[in-house]
Image (tube, rainbow, N blue to C red):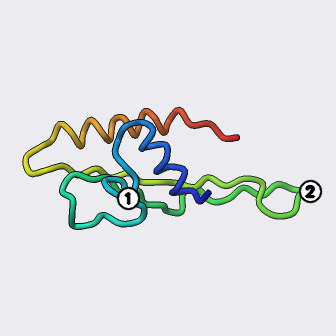
Amino acid sequence: MAFLDEIAVRLQTLGVGTIGTTIHKGVMPETPDACTAIYEYGGAPPDFNFGTTGISYETPAVQVVCRGIAYDYTTPRTNIGTAYIGLAKVEAT
């Protein structure tokens, strides 16, 4: 499963929205008004260790953006708070 797919599943599990309807990967569509977009970006550089070949570990980064209907601050703010707290609990496996 790709990185953004895993994040989208986690956000859906947290109740932020529904993948493909209100949770979108890599794009913020014009509609619906209330939706969440997940963007992947570079993050920190990979770590290389002496005596090993290749990358030891990577630190990818993700940006979660929530939008609501006109003049609704509370719903997108609640969704982004839920995403922030929920994603912060994810541990590397």
Identify the residue at image location x=57%, y=56%: 3
Per the image, label 1 sits on a secondary structure element best described as: loop
Identify the residue at image location x=49%, y=43%: 10
- Residue type at the position of mark 2: Gly
- Residue type at the position of mark 1: Gly
Mark 1 Cα shell of 10 Å, populated few (<14), some (14-19), many (≥20)? few
Mark 2 Cα shell of 10 Å, populated few (<14), some (14-19), many (≥20)? few
User: Quadrant of the image for the C terminus?
Assistant: top right
Q: Residue furthest left?
A: 71
Residue 65 percent location from the top left of the image? 32, 52
User: Quadrant of the image for the N terminus?
Assistant: bottom right
Q: Which mark is residue 20?
A: 1
Identify the residue at image location x=66%, y=41%: 92
Q: Which mark is residue 51?
A: 2
Task: Decide if residue 67 is on the left or right side of residue 16.
Answer: left
Residue 64 percent location from the top left of the image? 38, 51
Identify the residue at image location x=33%, y=36%: 81
Q: Nearer the N terminus, badge 2 or badge 1?
A: 1
Res. 25 image quadrant:
bottom left
Gap in angstroms between the C-alphas marked 2 and 1:
44 Å
The relative height of residue 85 versus residue 35 in the rendered view (above or below) is above
The relative height of residue 54 versus residue 7 in the rendered view (above or below) is below
Residue 30 percent location from the top left of the image? 21, 67
Task: Decide if residue 5 is on the left or right side of residue 12.
Answer: right
Number of callouts? 2
Callouts 2 and 1 close, C-beta under 8 Å: no
**Looking at this view, is 71 or 46 the one in front?**
71
Residue 13 percent location from the top left of the image? 45, 38
Per the image, label 2 sits on a secondary structure element best described as: loop
- Closer to us: mark 2 or mark 1? 1
